[in-house]
Image (cartoon, grey):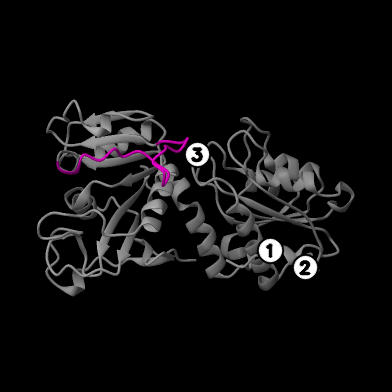
């Protein structure tokens, strides 16, 4: 993602065409990505353009309880230059009062004449800002009607997908993780698996744990590998933010299991119904769930269509035999294959991380 910081102050058409909207939304996406990915609030960025076409304010949401992106952008701007301005936002301005006042009202009161936003707010409690602004004389452009390109709109959608999952999917966003050899093995023929990937990949996986609300493993993995499922630093100390540790399966969890120890909380869901477990986690406020339960749990989740994102850590190692990362998915021919789309790639030491998502958004 290109950093367009140097564009601040550069002319942008006060009635933006597609290229100008793309530039402003690109910048807003850069700002949005600075906000925390975890927690109950979305990552949102806002760019304010005055009637002369210059960027006069920028802001992003820094986390629960802090000003929303629009409010932060308004606070950074010279109020005298906001009369007739355009606000370009990655998400529809909210129209509700929580810990912060409605952004829709703040934009109108500041004299903003036009609002361009990439994604509608799926949260029925917060939505309605666009309609309210339109009723109060502010021109509103949304999604493909904003003139933005499908590529930029897709990036905005994908940034917000995990946060929006409770409304768009009716459950938390689920990430499945694998750490494999180049030939797709998570363990050698004798069962040894530590360590296929290197230190950089393992450290990255621990950082991912800090950004999810719950981490789920099956009882088989707990009985075989005795994982702690905590988020740890390379020196072994624990990160401040810890996900809830969830063990799924009917077998008992040993009283001395590592998952019972460490900071944070753990629970045992004595069931094989992963959908019901996700439903309960969602009711408890979980938005992001990480599956680290080995091939059996991941395979069940994939067969049930419950995985939204895959984190595949690939090590330049060949084993030739051993446990496969994914068990039989009842796929008999290539035409039945599950097709995923590459979302990100990262080089981590000698290893590579491929982040893939199930669907491709269309505009």
Q: Is residue 197 left or right of residue 34?
A: left
Q: Residue at x 32, y 61 (%)?
A: 312
The secondary element bearing badge 2 is classed as loop
Q: Residues within 10 Å of mark 1 (few under 14, many from 20)?
A: many
Q: Are the residues flagged by discs 2 and 1 in contact, CB closer than 8 Å?
A: yes
Q: Pinpoint residue 263: horizontal percent, then vertical percent.
A: 38, 29
* Residue carrying label 1: 24
Disc 2: which residue: 12
Badge nearest the viewer, 2 or 3: 3
Which comes before the other along the chain, label 2 or label 1?
2
Front in this rendered view, residue 313 or 158: 313
Dot 2 alpha-carbon crowd within 10 angstroms: few under 14, some 14 to 19, many 20 or more: many
Q: Position of residue 238 (x, y in %)?
A: 42, 37
User: Quick one: which residue is furthest to the top in this view?
Assistant: 255
Labels 3 and 1 touching (C-beta < 8 A): no
Q: In the figure, residue 249 lies in which quadrant?
A: top left
> Pointer 3: residues within 10 angstroms few (<14), some, or many (20+)?
some
> Magenta-highlighted stretch: main secondary structure?
loop
- Name the secondary structure under disc 3: loop
Identify the residue position indicated by label 3 in the image: 39
Q: Which numbered disc flags the more N-terminal residue, 2 or 3?
A: 2
Q: Is residue 135 visible?
A: no
Relative to residue 19, is residue 138 depicted above or below? Answer: above
N-terminal label among 3 and 1: 1
Q: Nearer the viewer, mark 3 or mark 1?
A: 3
Real-space Cα distance between discs 2 and 1? 8 Å
Residue range highlighted in magenta: 224-242
Q: CA distance from mark 2 to mark 3?
A: 34 Å
């Amino acid at each position: 993602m290109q950093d367009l910081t140097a564009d601040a102050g550069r002319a942008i058409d006060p009635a933006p065409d597609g290229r100008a909207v793309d530039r402003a939304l690109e910048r807003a996406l850069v700002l949005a990505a600075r906000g925390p990915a975890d927690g109950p609030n979305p990552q949102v960025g806002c760019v304010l353009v005055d009637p002369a076409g210059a960027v006069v304010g920028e802001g992003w949401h820094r986390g629960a309880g802090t000003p929303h992106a629009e409010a932060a952008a308004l606070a950074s701007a010279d109020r005298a230059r906001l009369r007739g301005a355009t606000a370009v936002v990655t998400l529809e301005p909210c129209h509700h009062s929580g810990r912060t006042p409605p952004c829709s009202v703040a934009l109108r009161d500041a004299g903003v004449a036009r609002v361009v936003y990439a994604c509608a707010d799926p949260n029925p409690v917060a939505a309605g800002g666009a309609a309210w602004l339109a009723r109060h004389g502010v021109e509103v452009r949304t999604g493909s009607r904003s003139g933005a390109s499908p590529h930029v709109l897709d990036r905005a959608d994908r940034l917000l997908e995990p946060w929006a999952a409770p409304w768009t999917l009716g459950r938390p966003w689920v990430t499945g993780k694998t750490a494999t050899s180049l030939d797709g093995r998570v363990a050698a023929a004798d069962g040894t698996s530590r360590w296929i990937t290197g230190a950089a990949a393992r450290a990255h996986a621990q950082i991912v744990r800090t950004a999810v609300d719950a981490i789920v493993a099956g009882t088989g993995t707990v009985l075989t590998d005795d994982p702690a499922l905590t988020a740890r630093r390379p020196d072994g100390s624990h990160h401040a933010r810890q996900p809830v540790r969830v063990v799924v399966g009917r077998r008992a969890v040993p009283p001395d299991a590592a998952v019972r120890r460490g900071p944070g909380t753990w629970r045992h869901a004595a069931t094989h119904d992963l959908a019901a477990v996700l439903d309960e986690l969602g009711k408890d406020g979980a938005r992001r769930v990480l599956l680290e339960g080995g091939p059996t749990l991941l395979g069940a989740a994939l067969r049930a269509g419950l995985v939204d994102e895959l984190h595949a850590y690939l090590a330049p190692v060949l084993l030739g035999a051993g446990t496969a990362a994914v068990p039989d998915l009842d796929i008999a021919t290539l035409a039945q294959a599950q097709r995923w789309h590459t979302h990100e790639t990262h080089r981590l030491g000698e290893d590579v991380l491929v982040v893939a998502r199930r669907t491709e958004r269309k505009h």
